[in-house]
Image (cartoon, rainbow, N blue to C red):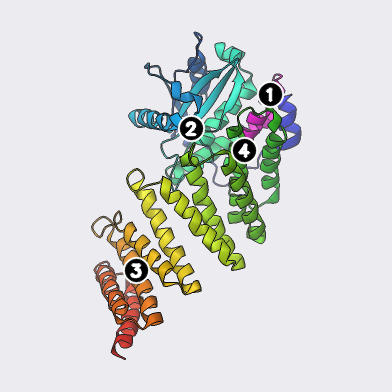
Amino acid sequence: MNLLDLLKHVFLEPRPSSPEDLSPEEALQINFKIIIVEFADNVESTGGQTITSILSTCEGLSVSYFEEPFNKSFLNLDGRTFFDLIDKGQSILERFGADVLIWGCREGNKIRLNFQTSYQYGKDNASFVSPLDCLYFPAEFFATPLNFPPALRTLVYGSVVSAIVPTNRQKQIQRRYLLKKIIAKLSSDNSAKSLSIDYLPYVMNFLGVIYLSYSYESETDKDFKIVRNLLENAIKHQDLIKNPLHLGCIYNHLGQLYGAAALHQPRRHAAYCKGAITNYRLSQKYIGKYTYPYDYGMISYKLSHLFYDYWKQKEDLQALRDSVFNLREAEKIFTYALFPDFWADIQGELGHILSVLGRLTGNDTISELALAAHKNRQKIITERRDPLLWASIQENIGEIYNFLGQKNGDTDSLEEALDCYHDALYIFENMQRHDDIKRLTTDIAKTSKLLNE
């Protein structure tokens, strides 16, 4: 496989300038922290130092090497030890305040790279890269930076930048700026050496992720087709993939691609939603909830949003039920004990979707489940911690009680609704939220009238 031909003549093209691009002077002010852990290797090697040396020359990165000894047996990506990998990686990321951690592990005559971040699993994760994504290279490349073909150095650089989760707008712009330069370099680098076809699915997967990370907000079919071609080329060579987990990762990225297109290309929203759902479900055949629960749970969470959006477009009640089912799957994994904030977000979404489903079906039990979910959320979102959000939740609870009270002629539910409305009104008045005050005052008057009839 000639990597240059694959990049230059088929998939990647230099990108036009964007008004949000940073100047070189502005870019120098931001450096993302990267930590490379000493590789797990059964022979004496300097693979970790080689990658450290390569990335240390890359713009926008501050790179450190971590060689403190510890047992790295969990790097076999066995589902039974996956929690150990995540926990150890998280502790190292927090210790160094790093944006990305790079793991390296030998498999025969190959070295496998994986990338982990501090914000890997959560509602606001803006990275398309998972710790399960694997990038393979011949082990001989890692003996010295001089052995590493320049185009593949750029590929590693792009993979690292793609994994970064920007925590503010400035970092998001810087990440995009770096990705633009990386893509331009990949498409024009004429120094690529021959690489065995065995590596093609993994290279294609990460090329797709790099381009998707740059263009996910694109409103053009051209960018969508470029990423799809890259990822579908990886799948076409699935006979070269020994571990089905890797195939699941590629389908996951196709789901991400279609999901991004559904958000930013409204003309074909329903079609892109269906494409995302299809690919995410295929991914879950290989990324199981009992082997790789966090990634499975994130896919379930995204599926819930897609089914909800599909319901809004098509008014398909089954899609609404599927949305609830997938949120319940995510709830089992991102628990109150381990992921309290994410769990609270899931409870809020469950409360909303169940309340809609309860109204449409007229099923009181579903409405009561919606109440329970909203109240669960208030275990995390307390009146003291976030009074405005707590008041909004209290208003949502009041609306469900109001619906049940009117539907069933139940004065107890109407009185509960009034109590909730008054709780929320007190907060809104103290925070001078005039539109909220006006709306709630009207709701209180209507509910009081119903009670007095």
Task: Report if residue 60 is visible in the image.
Answer: no
Looking at the image, tell me whether mark 3 or mark 1 is earlier in sequence order.
1
As drawn, the label of residue 198 is 1
Q: Are marks 2 and 4 in contact (CB under 8 Å)?
A: no
Residue at which label 2 appears: 79
Q: Looking at the image, which residue is at 43% across and 59% down? A: 349
Q: Are marks 4 and 3 in contact (CB under 8 Å)?
A: no
The residue carrying pointer 1 sits among few (fewer than 14), some (14 to 19) or many (20 or more) residues within 10 Å by Cα, namely some
Question: Residue 176, image x and y in percent?
Answer: 54, 40
Q: State the separation of the CA atoms marked 3 and 1.
A: 56 Å
Looking at the image, tell me whether mark 1 or mark 4 is earlier in sequence order.
1
Looking at the image, tell me whether mark 2 or mark 4 is earlier in sequence order.
2
Front position among marks 2 and 4: 2
Looking at the image, tell me whether mark 4 or mark 3 is earlier in sequence order.
4
Q: State the separation of the CA atoms marked 4 and 3.
A: 41 Å
Q: Are marks 1 and 4 in contact (CB under 8 Å)?
A: no
Looking at the image, tell me whether mark 1 or mark 2 is earlier in sequence order.
2
> Magenta segment, which residues?
184-211
The kind of residue on which mark 2 rests is Gly
As drawn, the label of residue 397 is 3
Residue at which label 4 appears: 250
